[in-house]
Amino acid sequence: MKSSYELAMERLAKSEPVIKLTAAQKKALAELDSRYAAKTAEREIALNGEIEAAATAGEFEKVAELRQRLTIERKRLQAELEEKKEQVRKPAKA
């Protein structure tokens, strides 16, 4: 007897088939993850340095602004990553 989870997964597979990724696609996705992790870390290090300097100088408004900028940068990089991943995942049209 199948569980409700298994039945739901079967229905989902019928309505939206699972796309198998090639080795090249998997490698490209891993490279994108690595590249964007590095970009994110680079921005965090740069902005955290600025945040620390502003906090030391007592510029609390600037600290808040820089923290908001860091959040925006993270979201932007994540959105950019997901967009590029989606392009890799799309099956090649023959």
Image (spheres, rainbow, N blue to C red):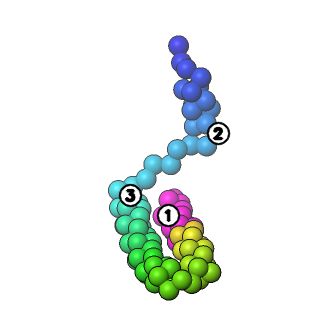
> Which residue is found at the position 53% from the left and 66% from the top?
78
Q: CA distance from mark 3 to mark 1?
A: 10 Å
Measured in 3D between alpha carbons, the distance from the residue under mark 2 to the one under mark 3, in whole angstroms, is 24 Å
Comes first in the chain, label 3 or label 1: 3
Q: Position of residue 73 (x, y in %)?
A: 55, 75
Give the residue number, with chain letter if any, for mark 1: 85
Element type at marker 3?
Answer: helix
**Looking at the image, is mark 1 or mark 2 earlier in the sequence?**
2
Q: Main secondary structure of the magenta part?
A: helix
Along the viewing direction, whichever of 48 and 5 lies nearer the viewer: 48
**Image position of 59 with respect to 82: above or below:** below
The region drawn magenta spans 77-94
The kind of secondary structure element at disc 1 is: helix
Q: Nearer the viewer, mark 1 or mark 2?
A: 1
**In this orientation, which residue lies closer to the viewer: 8 or 13?**
8
Type of amino acid under label 2: Ser
The type of residue carrying mark 3 is: Lys
Q: Nearer the viewer, mark 2 or mark 3?
A: 3
Which residue lies under the disc numbered 2? Answer: 15
Q: Is residue 13 left or right of residue 45?
A: right
Q: Is residue 87 left or right of residue 49?
A: right
Name the residue beneath numbered marker 3.
26
At 55% from the left and 20% from the top, the residue drawn is 3
- Residue 69 visible, this orientation: no
Circles 2 and 3 in contact, beta carbons < 8 Å? no
Badge 1 local density, few (<14 within 10 Å), some, or many (20+)?
some
